[in-house]
Amino acid sequence: MSNVYVMDHPLIQHKIGLIRREETGSRDFRALVSEIATLMCYEATRDLKLEDVKIKTPICETTAKQLEGKKLAIIPILRAGIGMVEGMLVLIPAAKVGHIGLYRDPETLEPVEYYCKLPADCDEREVFVVDPMVATGGSSAAAIDLLKAKGVKKIRFLCIIAAPEGVERMQREHPDVDLYIGALDDHLNDHGYIVPGLGDAGDRIFGTK
Ligand code: PRP
Ligand code: URA
């Protein structure tokens, strides 16, 4: 069974409180989503493997640490996942970035794929999939299906707000994927929106409504 980490860091909780407010406009919303992504990235990279490397300081030779392999990738689910990429890159600037385009059909709530461009060597990388929202879990599960079909083996998923329904689906369909969640909300409403949630993340990031 996958690990589910719900972030309890006070800065993350404070900033999530701000993006939930309906009066928060797109400029502040975007900036806060990016800051939350940086803080979540710090937590989600806590157990990356290190290796010893011999270096020379201005004083003497010594053994220092470096990330083992250094092969990371960030894959946002379009559109809203784009809002988390810059914040992740602040801490892991050498990561490659791929994109998976999925939107949720408003009637069926099923994910529809419209774009996929991944790093050529993504099957050799440890991948961080990012999307601010996991509601039914349909989009996140489909994105991971797609990555696994391309041979990706090490996947972590970061989202800012999740519904219990989506977390259950992810655990059922992808028990090997660890989930890093900013806040675990109460339930989904009849339109598949997270309650209390923050509304439509993509529209709020890009100002499209
Ligand atoms: C939102 C969100 C997730 C998805 C979550 O995207 O960013 O990708 O819904 O819902 P689910 O867990 O029920 O699949 P949306 O489909 O609204 O597309 P957008 O990012 O282009 O606005
Ligand atoms: N997608 C969103 O952007 N918000 C929700 O509450 C559910 C799905």
Image (cartoon, grey):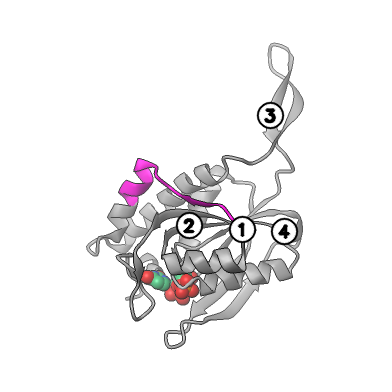
Separation of residues labelled 4 and 1 (CA atoms): 9 Å
Q: Which residue is mark 3?
A: 65
Q: Amino acid at mark 4?
A: Lys
- Give the residue furthest to the left: 23
Classed neighbour count for the residue bearing mark 1: other residues with Cα under 10 Å, few (<14), some (14–19), many (≥20) = some
Q: Which residue is mark 1?
A: 177
Which quarter of the figure is the N terminus placed in?
A: bottom right
66 and 163: which is toward the camera? 163
Classed neighbour count for the residue bearing mark 2: other residues with Cα under 10 Å, few (<14), some (14–19), many (≥20) = many
> Viewer-nearest of labels 3 and 1?
1
> Quadrant location of residue 160?
bottom left
Regarding residue 178, the answer to whether it shows in the image is yes
In the rendered structure, the answer to whether residue 69 lies left or right of residue 157 reads right
Separation of residues labelled 3 and 4 (CA atoms): 25 Å
> Viewer-nearest of labels 3 and 4?
4
Q: Which residue is mark 4?
A: 153
Residue at 72% x, 61% y: name it.
152
> Quadrant location of residue 57?
top right
Which comes sooner in the sequence, label 4 or label 2?
2
